[in-house]
Image (cartoon, helix red, strand yellow):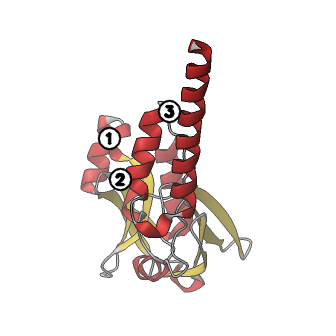
């Protein structure tokens, strides 16, 4: 008789769990699904329900994330071609939309923009510009040296990772002329 009572109890429990599962998954319009899910989870001791991952709205504007790869395509006057440098987005770029990015890199052509990759190409008409390599928000940055305000490029390389002597040089500002000299100087900080 005791086995029969236990079997009946197990069946009633199973039916209750099934009923709650059914009500949660097919009775969402009642607005009580959260309470039912909590009771169902408590009754069986672990999460029993399956949740649907919330998809981003279809009209969501893509933004740069920490995982976004940024490709800078530099002009090489010797070959009259371009070469590419790709790296992770600097923290200051995270959250920027396509429009924000185009404004931030005003002297660059925004070739493509999506959450995974941003491709920028240097405009050919600015090859003889002077630049100052310095620091901005704790990262190595390249500033224009011809009265133009703004940042030409912000790297993902933190200033704090550099030797003290290099940090002092950045604080004073390192003047470079042209893109070739700029690239050599940035490569020196990258190693």
Q: Determine which residue is flagged by label 1.
A: 160
Q: Residue at x 43, y 57 (%)?
A: 33
Q: Which residue is found at the position 25% from the left and 54% from the top?
A: 172
The quarter of the rendered structure image containing the N terminus is top right
> Nearer the N terminus, badge 1 or badge 3?
3
Image position, residue 17 (x, y; %): 54, 41
> Where's residue 35, x and y in %?
37, 51
Query: Can residue 88 be spotted in the picture?
Result: no
Q: Position of residue 190 (x, y in %)?
A: 50, 45
Q: Nearer the viewer, residue 44 or 123?
A: 44
Of labels 1 and 3, the one closer to you: 3
**Which of the two labelled residues, at mark 2 and mark 3, occupies the earlier sequence position?**
3
In the displayed structure, 105 sits above or below 33; it is below
Residue corresponding to mark 3: 44
Which secondary structure lies at badge 3? helix
The residues tagged by marks 1 and 2 sit, at their Cα atoms, a distance apart of 8 Å
Res 24 seen here: yes
Query: Badge 1: how crowded within 10 Å, few (<14), some, or many (20+)?
Result: few
Secondary structure found at label 2? strand
In the depicted view, which residue is nearer to us: 45 or 15?
15
Q: Is residue 161 left or right of residue 120?
A: left
Q: CA distance from mark 1 to mark 3?
A: 52 Å
Q: Which residue is mark 2?
A: 139
Q: Residues within 10 Å of mark 3 (few under 14, many from 20)?
A: few
Q: Position of residue 154 (x, y in %)?
A: 41, 62
Q: Give the quarter of the image for residue 124.
A: bottom right
* Foreground of the two, 186 or 49: 49
**16 and 167: which one is in front?**
16
Residue 91: quarter of image: bottom left
């Amino acid at each position: 008789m005791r086995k029969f009572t236990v079997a009946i109890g197990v069946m009633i429990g199973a039916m209750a769990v099934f009923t709650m599962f059914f009500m949660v998954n097919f009775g969402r319009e009642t607005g009580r699904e959260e309470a039912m899910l909590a009771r169902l989870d408590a009754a069986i001791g672990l999460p029993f329900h399956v949740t649907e991952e919330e998809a981003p709205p279809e009209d969501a504007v893509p933004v740069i994330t920490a995982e976004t790869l940024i490709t800078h395509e530099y002009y090489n006057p010797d070959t009259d071609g371009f070469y590419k440098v790709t790296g992770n987005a600097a923290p200051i770029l995270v959250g920027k939309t396509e429009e924000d990015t185009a404004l931030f890199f005003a002297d660059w052509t925004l070739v493509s923009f999506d959450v995974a990759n941003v491709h920028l190409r240097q405009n050919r008409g600015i090859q003889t510009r002077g630049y100052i390599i310095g620091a901005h928000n704790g990262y190595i940055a390249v500033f224009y040296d011809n009265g133009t305000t703004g940042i030409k490029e912000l790297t993902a390389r933190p200033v704090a990772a550099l030797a003290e002597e290099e940090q002092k040089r950045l604080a004073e500002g390192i003047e470079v002329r042209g893109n070739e000299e700029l690239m050599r100087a940035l490569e020196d900080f990258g190693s």
